Every structure is written in C-alpha cells, then in structure tokens.
Amino acid sequence: MLQLAALTADGSLLLIVGSPIAHEGRLFNCAVVMAGGNILGIVPKNFLPNTQEFYEERWFSAAADCRVKEVIIAGKAIPFGDDLLFENTNMPGCIVGAEICEDGWVASPPSGQMAVAGATLLVNLSASPEILGKRQYRRQLVSSQSARCLAAYAYASAGPGESSTDLVFSGHSLIAENGTILQESERFCFNTSWVYADIDIDRLQSERRKNNSFAASSSMREYRRIGFALHPLSGSLPLHRALERQPFVPAVADERSQRCQEIFALQTTALARRLQHIGTKNVAIGISGGLDSTLALLVVVKVFDLLGLDRRGIDAVTMPGFGTTKRTRDNAKKLIELLGVNSRVIPIDVAVRQHFNDIGHDETLRDITYENSQARERTQILMDIANQIHGIVIGTGDLSELALGWCTYNADHMSMYGVNCGVPKTLVRYLVSWCAESSYCGETRAVLEDICATPVSPELLPPNAAGEISQVTEDHVGPYELHDFYLFHVVRNQFAPKKVLFLAQVTFAGVYEDAMLLRWLQVFYRRFFAQQFKRSCLPDGPKIGSVALSPRGDWRMPSDASVQLWLDELEDLND
C-alpha cells in the first residue's frame, strides 16, 4: 500500500484502491485514498451482503462497528471512517467521496449523503459478479445515482482474473455524470483495462445551484474533509468528453425520432388543452412557407384531428408582401390545399404602402421601419380574423428567435398562444422532417421536404434579380447552430463567456475560425440582453425542454440588465 502511495508523489494523481484493513481484532473492507505520496484516509464499507453467493459477514465488519477515527499505518495516524471526504484544494468544487460495492445498491446509499455534504465526484470500488441482465441493471444504478446526486459517479469492478470456482467477474467499469454515461469499459477482458473521461465540475455546481430541492437536503451527519492538492496539468490537452454541435438535437436517428415524437405530443397536448378551455373551434395562423409556420400548422392540424374538429376551422392565412418569393408562396399554397384547411390570401403591399404614406415613410428607404411595418400589418390581419371567427391567433416563433429577439415587437412576437416557443431553431427542421416521414406521403411529404430545404428568412426585403430570397437570417444574426449551442451552454449550464467560447472552439474546430466564433458569441450576448424586453411580455406557450425563456417560469430577467460584464470577459480574450 505504501508503494502504491509513493506512485502519487508527483502530485498528478489521486489513487483509490480497495484493501482489507485489520484493526483491534476486526477486518474491514476499505477504500484507501492516496495522493501526494501519502495515504490520505481510509473509508470502510457500510453494507455487507450476506445472501445468495455473498458471505461478507463471515470475515468483515461494517463501518458502524468501528469506533475509532484513526488507524496507525507505518507509524502514521491515518483518518479512518465512512465520514471522510477528500477535497482538491487546487480545484474548487472537486470533492471526492468513496463507497464500496453493496453500498451503492442499497435504498439509501452513503454516496447520497456524501453528495449532499458537498462531494461532486463519487467513486465505487466493487467486486460484483456477473450474471445475466446485471450489466444493464448496473448501468441504470450508476446513471440514476449520478442523476439523483447531481454528481459524477465512477464505478470500477473486479475483472476475470478473479477465481471462477463459482462466479465470473467481468471488470465492468462505468463513469456517469448527472445521469449520462460518459464512458463504459468492455467486459470479460483479461488484459488490464481502464476507462477515463473529463468531468465538468462547473456544470455539476451549476445544476446544484439551480436545484433548490438539492440545496434543501441536509446531510444527516458531519463529514471530515481531507485536503489534497493535485497540480494542474500543463500544456494543451485533448478534451476526453463528447461535445455535441447541436445539443438540442440527438445525434442517433432513433433517439432523434423519439425526441421529435415527444415534442410534437407536448405541443399538441398544450394547444388542445387551451382550445378546450376556451371552447373555440377556430384558429387563425399565418403561413409563410417557412419552417416555423409550417411546424405550427402541422401542430394545429393534429390538434383538430385529436379533438374531432373540422379542419376548415383552421384559417391559414398567406400574406404576400415585398419580400415574398415564388418558392415560399407556392409551398404555402400547396401545403394549405393538401392539408385541407381553410385558405385566405391577403396581400399586404397596398395596406403597407398606405401606411407608409400615412406616417411619411419613403418606400425606397428599406430600413427597420420598412421591415417592421410589414410584420405588424400581418399580425393586425391575423388578430382581426381571429375576432371574426371567434378564435385565437396561433404564434409560430421559436425559442432561438426569442433568445436573439429576432422578431418584431408586437408583430410576429405576439399571438394568443405560441406553440413553438420552446423549440430551438436547430430542432424545428428535424421536427418538420419527422412529421413528413412519419405522418405524410406523396405530394404533402414532398412539399414539407422542400420547406426543410428553404433558407431561413423573414422575407421582408425584395427578392434578388433571380426572384430568390435575398434576406437570409443567418447572414445577419449568425448561424443558428452556433446560437443554439451558445443558448444551451449560457442558459442551461450557466457557463461563463470564456468557457462557452472554449467549448465552441473545441466543438467547431475546422468548421468556424476562432475569430468567427468570438464574433457571433458577442452578438449572442448583446442580442440576448438587449432583447429581453420582448421576452418579458411573451404570450402563453408550452415549455418543451430544459431551456425555456418564459418570464412566468424559467427565465426572470430585468429588461434593462447590463451585458457589459460578459462582453468585458470576451474582450479580455481578444487582448
């Protein structure tokens, strides 16, 4: 044991090994924690199984049977007990707790109390024999414990080098973080095997700060903290952690399909409940031929079918203006016809020109007034139609637009119920595609697929000479895959600008230059703060995922909050 401890002398390693420890006529099954060339402490096992193939009580005593706080090893007093936590003084928040095998399988594992007492990294040293079905059960156990504890959980079990007289040991090892399995070993490998992963301590601390139920949980015991200091690793090292370019979109096709199905069910259930409450059989929705309005229309159609309502009660209104292209106009028209909803075509050019004349605006001046006048005219039309039919206006704006404020105040920003408000832009395209594949065929599917292939645009500026979209949203505000990435890590994980940029640099290496990532991150922060006033008066709409911006729920932010601290941190990175 002392030889093993000596391997940690350079300060680069925390080593935890299983060992029997004899003390005052009793034998304890222990985790021995070592760092800096020393034995830091010894944690005895709490729960000793004595059933089926297990006979641990024949030899071992439980932690509760030991009344001392220290044991003497090689002439040194070593902290001993199941009340030990180990704190890395060079890494704030990195606190390690250890339990052994059966401890992790009981109704109230010791690791739960350790987590409440501050441990963010929990380890389990195990000798768990393998039987049919146990691997999956063990995975679920490790995953769920890491989720309940809002912690990382590293599990390592004895391998096939153990005796096979009656049992087989597989060497199953797992690393989980807040419910997600980060790494898993192969089983039944006779060669020495190991797994490793990067743990995000910042993320775990953020999750704990947000979860007041976790904060309200009080540890039933006092823990002794043993300090150790691991030297920070020098140089640039690869990140051993999978980072998703689209954190809102599952990478695996089957999982993505299941996610889309669940989101669509959330949207349709929410709208169905609202229509039932109001008692209306009519809605008005603006259809542009773009992704957001298409998804909203598909939701409305599904709701009407679920409630047994006539689809003719859906007033799908196309309102061509100065920027409408043939492609989007034709797709909107075809989709409305194919879905069998009521169609209204109301051009807005005459009304908007009259408005320009009323307020004295030069039509050749294509500024924000030029654009927003069209958006507000469309919303006025929809609101008045809703009054005509005794229905409500369905909002089509998505979560990403709300984050960036990429909507016109009191225009597309406003509705009577927004079905897309919890869906980020990177996911909208997949949802429409999923609807096309799962619910439609023939010409309807073809139209939906073409809509998915259409560039995102508000179409408020005239088309180019070829009649194509000239105003591409991502040319102005930046790529949505970047903004959704930033949105996830800023709001969901509450990371600082420096860390968000670092993660983006790793994730999008070879896709975007660092200068581009920094530029669009600055844009994100500026817009996110400056546009809060639009989110402060959002219409109702369903929360879909863990990132939500409703001022009545998840996101309560002053409209006049200053962004300067965040921009200053990014500016420091520029210097």
Image: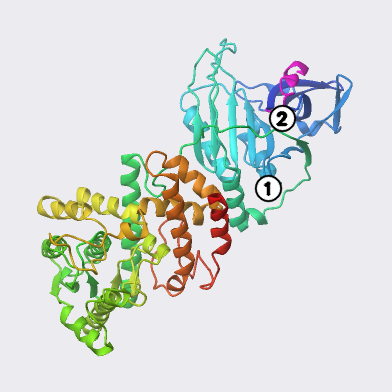
Q: Secondary structure at mark 1?
A: helix
How is colour applied across the structure in the image? rainbow
Q: Nearer the viewer, residue 24 or 161?
A: 161
How far apart are labels 1 and 2 at the CA level? 19 Å
Q: Label 1, on which residue?
A: 116
Q: Secondary structure at mark 2?
A: loop
Q: Amino acid at mark 2?
A: Lys
Quadrant of the rendered image containing residue 508: top left
Q: Position of residue 475 (x, y in %)?
A: 31, 57
Q: Nearer the viewer, residue 60 or 424?
A: 424
**Residue plotted at (44% across, 41% down):** 507
Residue 138 is one of the magenta-drawn residues? no
Q: Position of residue 137 (x, y in %)?
A: 50, 33
Q: Label 2, on which residue?
A: 45
Left or right of residue 6: residue 186: left
**Residue plotted at (72% across, 49% down):** 219
Tag 1 near tag 2, CB within 8 Å:
no
Left or right of residue 562: residue 302: left
Residue 59 appears in the rendering: no
Q: Which residue, as the protein is rendered here, is positioned at the far right? A: 75
Left or right of residue 307: residue 56: right
The residue carrying pointer 2 sits among few (fewer than 14), some (14 to 19) or many (20 or more) residues within 10 Å by Cα, namely: many
Q: Nearer the viewer, residue 262 or 338?
A: 338
Magenta span: 1-12
The residue carrying pointer 1 sits among few (fewer than 14), some (14 to 19) or many (20 or more) residues within 10 Å by Cα, namely: many
